[in-house]
């Protein structure tokens, strides 16, 4: 007999008839999980009632942690342990009313063999829809089959029908008829420009500076080098600790000059007395040092774009990097000189920043910047969270709301932009946002994503509407009122079509001066991606 210590064999529980297992993936931050726990319980009850209509019961695969007081899976390890209580073939639902870290449940979902459903509540107060979109994007990248569903309270006919479909068949079919593959492109100045810029990128190559890879469990936002490098894009792996070290070398005088520039440009900071809850001068001063430090490091490494992970780690050491990110993405921004003062760095240009180190955004921001610049247009582009939305005046208007900063030109300039303290629930050391309401106008929207181990991009057109002040405020109050908002209308894409198709919590947006120019710029972008070997899909009404 062997004297070796063999591990005890693991046995998953046996399948139970008519039982659906539920797990709740959460944030890593205790404060965020506690804040969202009440809403989560309501959503779980609503979903259980919908399932109950068809004679199924819901079994929660994990309880409330008495030490934390909430019932979210709040780490990858916790998720792995929870999945040891779930029969491998069971119908499994990830119910999410909050922003969640996909890697908390990815390990379990990868090895689960039963049908998987991801559900969220159609509500603005917590970013559950954003969490759902990240998880479905991550599952798409991982090649794990899933279905997804969203509803205000799971009592509407549409959602109940979909719940029934899933219980009966193990999948939900959504209408994806708005998506088509790229047709043969016409020979035009725009398509030739796109192809030429693609060839230049592949031949001359570009660097994206990645300040700590992977943010908030966003597995979908990591593009492996094997997929990225063939585009001509290479990562420079940087550390947020280097950013902090570089901040120490920026003088108070340099930070004050940046501040003066912003004051002169008409930017308003909303200051208050309490560092724990309000924005303070000291927080902004530190952020402006970070701005200078980030540009200097980018220059040191010859980066064409940078991304700051910004959350775990950095949020505990410094005020949030959002203000920095918004400034970088704008062409008009405070000048930054080399350490010895000898030259201005990236003069007269945006330095594209991919927030939350979302590398799908990195690719998109870089090429969009180049196309729009070559066409003589404002290249300022940004991601937004697909946060929520409601009809207004008979049309569906999305709340696109990034968690902190947009380029000022999207708000119509610095004088129409302002800074609020980042909410303490997410950012203990505060920091200013670069907020505002995105100006009305024509946009091109997009998302680069990984599916079937290949790079794809969805491209579409839309416009931004101006809503009455009360409606803007209502939408802000219903979400995170400190953050920048865009009232987006997508052309030929319904609410449910976007939710079903989009493979990320983020959507990339860029303005064009009019509809005709937006169509032309989209053609150039489609051509560039096509030339790079990225699969291009057109979503909704696109003039191509
Ligand atoms: C502060 C929050 O965690 C946000 O960062 C989160 O909702 C996102 O922005 C996800 O993209």
Image: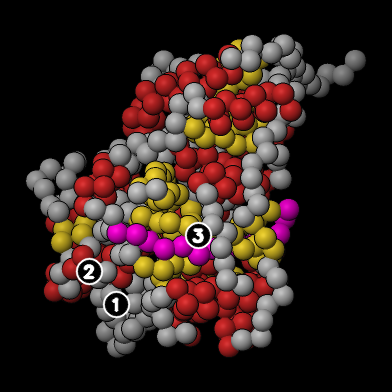
Q: Is residue 274 left or right of residue 542?
A: left
The numbered disc on residue 267 is none
Mark 2 or mark 1, earlier in chain: 1
Pointers 1 and 3 in contact (C-beta within 8 Å): no
How far across and down, in percent of the image, does residue 136 sit? 59, 42
Q: Which mark is residue 414?
A: 2
* Badge 1 residue CB within 8 Å of ligand 1: no
Residue 465: within the magenta?
Answer: yes
Provide the secondary structure element on which disc 2 rests.
Answer: helix
Distance from disc 1 to disc 3, alpha carbons, whole Å, reads: 30 Å
- Return the residue at label 3: 491
Quarter occupied by the N terminus: top right
Residue 254 visible here: yes
Q: Quadrant of residue 36?
A: top left
Number of marks drawn: 3
Using residue 58 as the reference point, say whether residue 336 is left or right of it. Answer: left
Magenta span: chief secondary structure: strand
Q: Which residue is mark 1?
A: 332
Q: Please indicate whether residue 471 sits to the left or right of residue 187 in the image.
A: left
Q: Is residue 319 above or below residue 45?
A: below
- Tell me the magenta residue range: 452-466
Residue 5 visible in the shown view: no
Is 56 situated above or below 466? above
Residue 538 horizontal/vertical position (percent): 62, 63
Figure quadrant of the C terminus: bottom right
Depth order, front residue of 201/235: 201
Residue 382 against residue 160 in the figure, above or below? below
The residues tagged by marks 3 and 2 sit, at their Cα atoms, a distance apart of 29 Å
Residue 57 in the image, given as x and y percentages of width and height: 61, 12
Secondary structure of residue under mark 1: loop
């Amino acid at each position: 007999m062997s004297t070796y210590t063999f591990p005890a064999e693991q046995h998953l529980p046996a399948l139970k008839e008519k039982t659906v297992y539920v797990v709740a993936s959460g944030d890593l931050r205790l404060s965020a999980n506690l804040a969202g726990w009440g809403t989560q319980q309501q959503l779980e009850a609503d979903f259980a009632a919908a399932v109950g209509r068809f004679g199924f019961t819901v079994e929660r695969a994990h309880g409330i942690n008495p030490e934390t007081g909430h019932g979210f899976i709040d780490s990858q390890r916790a998720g792995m342990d929870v999945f040891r209580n779930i029969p491998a073939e069971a119908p499994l639902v990830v119910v999410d009313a909050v922003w969640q870290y996909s890697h908390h449940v990815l390990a379990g979902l990868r090895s689960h063999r039963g049908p998987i459903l991801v559900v969220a509540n159609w509500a603005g107060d917590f970013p559950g829809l954003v969490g759902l979109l990240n998880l479905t994007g991550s599952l798409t990248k991982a090649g794990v089959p899933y279905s997804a569903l969203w509803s205000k309270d799971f009592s509407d006919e549409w959602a109940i029908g979909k719940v029934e479909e899933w219980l009966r068949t193990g999948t939900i079919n959504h209408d994806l008829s708005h998506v088509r593959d790229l047709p043969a492109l016409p020979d035009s100045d725009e398509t030739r420009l796109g192809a030429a810029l693609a060839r230049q990128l592949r031949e001359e190559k570009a660097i994206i500076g990645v300040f700590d890879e992977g943010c908030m469990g966003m597995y979908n936002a990591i593009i492996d080098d094997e997929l990225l490098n063939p585009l001509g894009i290479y990562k420079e792996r940087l550390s947020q600790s280097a950013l902090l070290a570089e901040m120490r070398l920026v003088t108070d005088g340099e930070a004050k000059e940046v501040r003066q520039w912003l004051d002169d440009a008409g930017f308003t900071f909303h200051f208050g007395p309490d560092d724990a809850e309000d924005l303070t001068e000291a927080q902004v001063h530190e952020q402006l040092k970070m701005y200078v430090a980030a540009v200097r490091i980018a220059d040191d490494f010859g980066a064409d774009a940078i991304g700051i992970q910004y959350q775990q780690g950095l949020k505990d050491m410094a005020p949030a990097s959002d203000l920095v990110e918004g400034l970088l993405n704008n062409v008009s921004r405070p000048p930054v000189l080399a350490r010895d003062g000898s030259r201005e760095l990236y003069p007269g240009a945006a330095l594209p920043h991919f927030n939350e180190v979302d590398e799908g955004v990195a690719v998109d921001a870089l090429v969009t910047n180049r196309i729009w610049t070559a066409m003589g247009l404002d290249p300022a582009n940004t991601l937004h969270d697909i946060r929520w939305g409601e009809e207004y005046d008979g049309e569906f208007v999305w709340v696109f709301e990034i968690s902190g900063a947009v380029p000022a030109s999207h708000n119509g300039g610095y004088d129409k932009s302002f800074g609020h303290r980042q909410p303490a629930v997410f950012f203990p050391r505060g920091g200013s946002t670069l907020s505002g309401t995105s100006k009305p106008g024509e946009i091109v929207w997009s998302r680069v994503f990984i599916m079937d181990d290949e790079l794809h991009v969805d491209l579409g057109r839309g416009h931004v509407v101006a809503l009455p002040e009360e409606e803007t405020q209502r939408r802000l109050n219903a979400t995170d009122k400190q953050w920048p908002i865009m009232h987006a209308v997508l052309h030929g894409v319904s609410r449910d079509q976007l939710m079903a198709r989009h493979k990320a919590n983020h959507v990339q947006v860029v303005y064009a001066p009019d509809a005709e120019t937006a169509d032309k710029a989209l053609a150039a972008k489609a051509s560039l991606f096509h030339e790079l070997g990225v699969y291009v899909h057109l979503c909704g009404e696109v003039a191509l």
